Amino acid sequence: MYCLGIESTAHTFGISIVERYSRKVFSNVRDMFRSESGGLIPVELSEHHVAVWESVLHSAIERAGISLSDISLIAYSRSPGLGHALRIGSIVARCLSLRLGVPLVGVNHCIAHLEVGRVHSGFADPVLLYASGANTQIIALEEGLYRVFGETIDLGVGNFLDSVARFLGLGFPGGPALERLAAEYSGPLLPLPYSVKGMDVSFSGMQTAVRSLLSSHSPQAIAFSVQEHAFALLVEVSERALAHTGKQSLVLGGGVACNQRLSSMCQRMCSVRGVSCFIPDKEFLVDNGAMIALLGIRHAEKNLFIPVSQAGIDPYERTDEVSSLHQ
Ligand code: AMP
Ligand code: MG
């Protein structure tokens, strides 16, 4: 009994095969749109997903060592994301559901990041620091709803890092390139705006300030200072969410959590507070089909199937509009 999970909210088209009872991930294949210019153009993304979906599907089936007829559930990312990208995943999901005669579930991408962290850490009820390209949220369950305890009020942290990388003439994705540059620097921290507003964070002030540093400082100094400021914001609000909720564990999600500096800052904060910290393997931090399948399996356990005729997309669904699956 296998679930096939399809991720298609933004730059990545991914398909994973997960066994429904053991939650074991048998394959997790992804193909990410890349561009030299550093931009993400929705029409180009959708063309990429249309071009790769079939080969991603075949690799996922082949690597799992199963055949299509072994699939008993299709899960797809229904929300939130770029409409152009979401639509390709939902069409592939609907076609497979019809072709194989198996039920369909549509899941929220942000909650899927929480679910993969929860399953792989074994923590019953963690706080999630979700730091990705478009999204930056601190999410936890409270009274039957996934609450957003803090979030960016402008850019996602990954998009912010990508824009800094673009200023420095680096391609997309920019986060890994900035991490490499930052590691080469050992000078003083450059001052940048540090914007925490209540539990929310903001990156646009820092983005404007970085432009004015470009001509007078090295890319290494800029990369280092940007990382230190941006990650300190995230760690500060994560710590406050832990303090407010009294929860005993933090999990990380999103591509920015691949960053060693961010993960070591989170681990240090958690160890000082005496709470547990779990950072999933990279393949489960970035956008991937396995987290969609894992959350889809929970939807199926609650009979939250959707008919093919209603299996659309919801680009703007917010995390706190989704009811808890834990009841
Ligand atoms: P996601 O949207 O979750 O797939 O993550 C993509 C984002 O993660 C992009 O903005 C990348 O620049 C960023 N990212 C990936 N690896 C790293 C890294 N090592 N350090 C910082 N950001 C990263
Ligand atoms: Mg994501």
Image (cartoon, grey):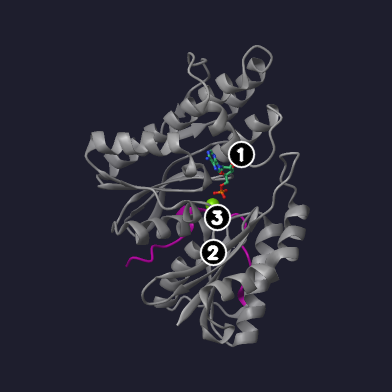
Instruction: Say whether mark 3 is within 8 Å of ligand 1.
Output: yes
Q: Which mark, by number, is residue 205?
A: none
Magenta highlight range: 310-327
Mark 3 or 1: the one toward you:
3
Per the picture, the main secondary structure of the magenta-coloured stretch is: loop
Q: Specify few, some or many for label 2: CA neighbours under 10 Å numbering under 14, 14-19, or 20 or more.
A: many
| Residue found 44% across the figure and 34% down from its top | 261
Circle 3 SS class = loop
In the picture of the structure, the residue carrying the numbered disc 2 is 289
- Rendered location of residue 8, percent (x, y): 62, 61
- Rendered location of residue 148, percent (x, y): 43, 47
Q: CA distance from mark 3 to mark 1?
A: 14 Å
- Rendered location of residue 140, percent (x, y): 36, 51
Q: Specify few, some or many for label 1: CA neighbours under 10 Å numbering under 14, 14-19, or 20 or more.
A: many
Instruction: Say whether mark 1 is within 8 Å of ligand 1.
Output: yes
Q: Specify few, some or many for label 3: CA neighbours under 10 Å numbering under 14, 14-19, or 20 or more.
A: many
In the picture of the structure, the residue carrying the numbered disc 1 is 159
- Rendered location of residue 245, percent (x, y): 28, 45
State if disc 2 and disc 1 touch (CB < 8 Å).
Answer: no
State if disc 3 and disc 2 touch (CB < 8 Å).
Answer: no
Residue 106 in view of the camera: yes
Q: Quadrant of ligand 1?
A: top right
The mark that comes first in sequence, 3 or 1, is 1
Q: Which mark, by number, is residue 287?
A: 3
The mark that comes first in sequence, 1 or 2, is 1
The answer to which of 33 and 195 lies nearer the viewer is 33
